[in-house]
Amino acid sequence: MSTAKARTAYAKAILGPELHHRIADTKVLIVGAGGIGCELLKNIVLTGFGKITLLDLDTIDLSNLNRQFLFRKKDVKQSKALVAAQTAAPFNPNVQITPIYGNIKEPQYDLEWFQQFDIVLNALDNLDARRHVNKMCIAAQIPLVESGTAGYLGQVQPILKDKTECFDCIAKPTPKTFPVCTIRSTPSQPIHCIVWSKSYLMGQLFGEDEDAVGELDEAEKQGENAQEIATLRREALAFQAVRKALRSSAASGAAKLVFQKVFDADIRNLLIMSDMWRARAPPVPLDFDAILDETFVLRPDEPVSNGKLNGVSKPVNAVASGSKAPVNGTSGNDVGSSAQPVAGSGLKDQKQLSLKDNVLLFVSSTERLAARLQTGEATITFDKDDDDALDFVTATSNLRSAAYGIPGKTRWEVKEMAGNIIPAIATTNAIISGLIVLQALQILRKSYDKLRNVHLQVKPAVPLSTITLCPPNTACGVCRDTYANILCDPKRALLGDVIKGVLGDDDREVSVYEDKRVLSDPDWDDNHDRTLESLNVTRGMFLTIVDEEGERGTISVGLGVLPADHPADAPPFILPDPLPRPPQRMKVSPPAPETPLRVSLKRSAPDDTGGDEIIDLEPTPKRPKLNAANMAIKSPSKKRRLDEDGLILMEGKDDKLDDDIIVID
Ligand SMILES: [Zn+2]
């Protein structure tokens, strides 16, 4: 038997000659070439798929090499898609892999582009991209196999328009957030200080010069303490001065200025609000010079040597001395100097830092970041793999913790908490990738009754559980829409013409959205004679046409480009044929109508780009919106079944697997 035949003999025997022959011509799109993507590409190539497009926006990082086995050290910084394709192509001489180094959300990957594929396989690591691909596949009517892993957990979900639930049929929990004031004034846990440091302080010092007033206005509306908000506003203003110092060429001393503002003056301002500290321990302002001189006393009346801070038994990490300092009999009160030997000091990252260590780390990281600003970096945002940023967040969160009597964290722990890292496990990725292929083969066989949602779980007796697919959630705002594709020139096509064209002789009253932006409604057609481009509605986006009476389903029109040979004097768009006709639906009694906020066109300059007139709104009440509450009403049976089986629903809020906190590869 020749090598080529031997290579495919088993696959052919398993798949049967017909399917085996067919998959050689099946066009597959794999989105993601990371942990799952590498395994999946290998599987797909070895199964005998012949026409593969592989897209990923990332480059290879050293930390990928322990599990993304298509990459080698020499490939670091190269495109994942390109290198994966080069490595996997020789696995099967008959395969044709088209790698794309790009973002799946770019406009050229529009509906028409998706429609060239027979099946799409997701190997993505973030909720946003997964939802986007879900919507595109639903709109293009292309089967999708969705997947995700987090540590030892994983799942595979086949998605077919009108047959199964889509990725958005079940509401996903939003990432955990904290009240503004907990983060800004009254932290009580290390994570509060880490979030403050990476999301707030880094932004204030090294991010764009944005005004924090909006956030504070919102917090005030939410009923947070008005006096406190006023203090925070003053604090925001004072940031201007230190921002300037960090960016000036003579920045030496800027770190100390930042320190004195953030860890001394700001804390003193907060202390003025005595009400705030009636029921909680007040923070202690830190003294830069005294800490460096080792004469600083954090909390003189509370000995640290007994492991208690503010009456609560806690580790003394925040105030413990540097790891090299011997126990030298210094008073335990003197937390600025060596008071305790430190455990786990073997590795730099796992060393407990003393107050002085943190100040030194703060100075050095602030200086490194300031130098980057002065040599041309416009802004620096937190990235767990950016050593300067991680050092800065480690030092500043620990200093804040010390001021508030909260235990400190090692650099390693800060990296984990700030990056919200759940370790990626190669075997989980391998199992999930295998399951993706099995589900994909069922789809290609059209054995729809054999499709299953598969969950990999931490249950030794039942490592894999399968759930029969549920029909779409009738309230889903994604897969219950009727989709169509319109080819147009957004520079010339007018919103009103496009809407009229799509509706044809259907004279229902409609509102039109792009995502959450209202573009028109029955009482407001000011935008109808504007071009789509001026409304910032372009290729790859959707116009969503919502029936005001709620009698018919919603129409979502994807925007594509006109063919190259489209005559210049012809209408600037080509309508879908046939026109989309959403099904009649059960009339639900609509909530009291709300008048959408909007700004009259008359007040705007005629040539403005349109952003001003369009107000971001939640979709109207009539456009069904998923939330936990209506899920409970819509599909109680499913929820119960999941609970009874004890199955792990990856998106379940109890799993703490909010997408943003998962590194899924
Ligand atoms: Zn859906």
Image (cartoon, rainbow, N blue to C red):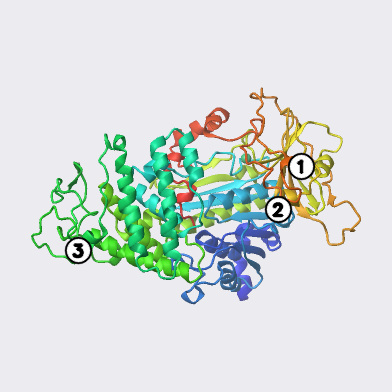
Front residue of 534 and 104: 534
Q: Amino acid at mark 2?
A: Gly
Instruction: State the SS at label 1.
Output: loop
Instruction: State how far apart marks 3 and 1 are (Cα).
Output: 66 Å
Residue 326 in percent (x, y) is at: 13, 65
Q: Which residue is mark 1?
A: 527
Residue 327 visible, this orientation: yes
| Crowding at mark 2 (Cα within 10 Å: few <14, some 14-19, many 20+) | many
Asked which quadrant contains residue 539, the reply is bottom right
Residue under pointer 3: 293
Q: Which residue is mark 2?
A: 540
Queried on whether the Cβ of the residue with tag 2 lies below 8 angstroms from ligand 1, the answer reads: no
- The mark nearer the N terminus, 3 or 1, is 3
Residues under labels 2 and 3: Cα distance?
60 Å
Check whether the beta carbons of the residues at disc 1 and disc 2 lie within 8 A of each other: no
Q: Is residue 313 above or below residue 338?
A: above
